[in-house]
Image (tube, grey):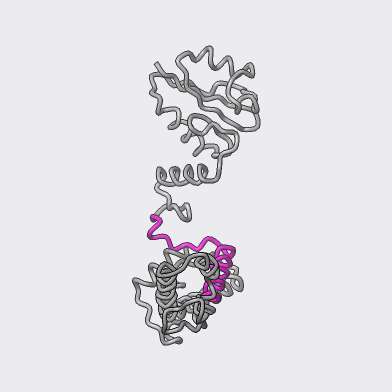
Amino acid sequence: MVHIYILELVEGKYYVGKTNNPGFRIDQHFHSGGAAWTRKYQPIRIVEIINDCDDYDEDKYTRIYMDKYGVENVRGGSFCEEVLDESTINMLEKMSNSVKNKCFICGKVGHFAKECGTCNNLEDIDKCLVTLETFIKEKRELEKMNVPFEIPTKENGGIPMHNKRLGNFIGHRGGSYENDLLEKEYIRTKEQKNKNEEYIPMFEVIHKSLQLLHEKIEEQKQSPPNTSLVNDLLLQFSKQQGITINEETISKLLRGLF
């Protein structure tokens, strides 16, 4: 029979373990012969022993106690390392939110992630602004490139500026192989330039909207607004710029940003 036991440790820590012989195993923990967690944090008392369990229950009770006392204060089962990596912590938080019917994004109840309209804080908006500024700058640079209407070769200087490595690489090859690579790079660059012409104005509209949103939050010291305000700002700036952005596109953009 599998028994699950929970130990309270010093400094507000807890340990969840399983055993077929609870008396022997628990005694080991109290005499520094147990897990690394209980060697680091001395056990104070036995919180409870749950009988007639299976092997999966160790993880279940570990998660229950993590939800109650915090991931940083509980170890056991599959989560017994002293220091949990970031991906494991994120996974545990999402599992906890799922059990409590909380949104994966903001951690609040009443809606799910796809319906979340919360922008966490000004720091998040700052990150969005920096990312968009970099993106727009890079795409504008590419837009300025004089893409020739002939298949570029090393002789006519048509190897795209942003892929000099390609030029170095194919310099050691020759013939049709070289021309094939250059032709593909030429087509890719033309396609990217065409996409820039369509999407860059949209991203500039988003950038302006976020800047204004940032200013409003900072001025009013208010709680971050939901996406309805951002939606209104996007529509406002898109009309000013003469750009058509439909509701579906805005929805997709907002899900990506927030």
Q: Residue at x 47, y 22 (%)?
A: 18
Between 207 and 10, which is closer to the camera in this rendering? 207
Q: Residue at x 58, y 26 (%)?
A: 8
Q: Up-down: is 143 above or below 91?
A: below
Q: Up-down: is 107 above or below 78?
A: below
Instruction: Specify the quadrant of the image occupied by residue 130.
Output: bottom right
Q: Residue at x 61, y 73 (%)?
A: 219
Q: Position of residue 193 (x, y in %)?
A: 44, 78
Q: On the picture, is 253 further left or further right than 165?
A: left
Q: On the picture, is 139 further left or further right than 252?
A: right
Taking the image as drawn, is residue 232 in sight? Answer: no
Q: Up-down: is 39 above or below 117?
A: above
Q: Main secondary structure of the magenta part?
A: helix
Region rendered in magenta: 111-139
Q: Count of labels shown?
A: 0
Q: Position of residue 215 (x, y in %)?
A: 58, 74
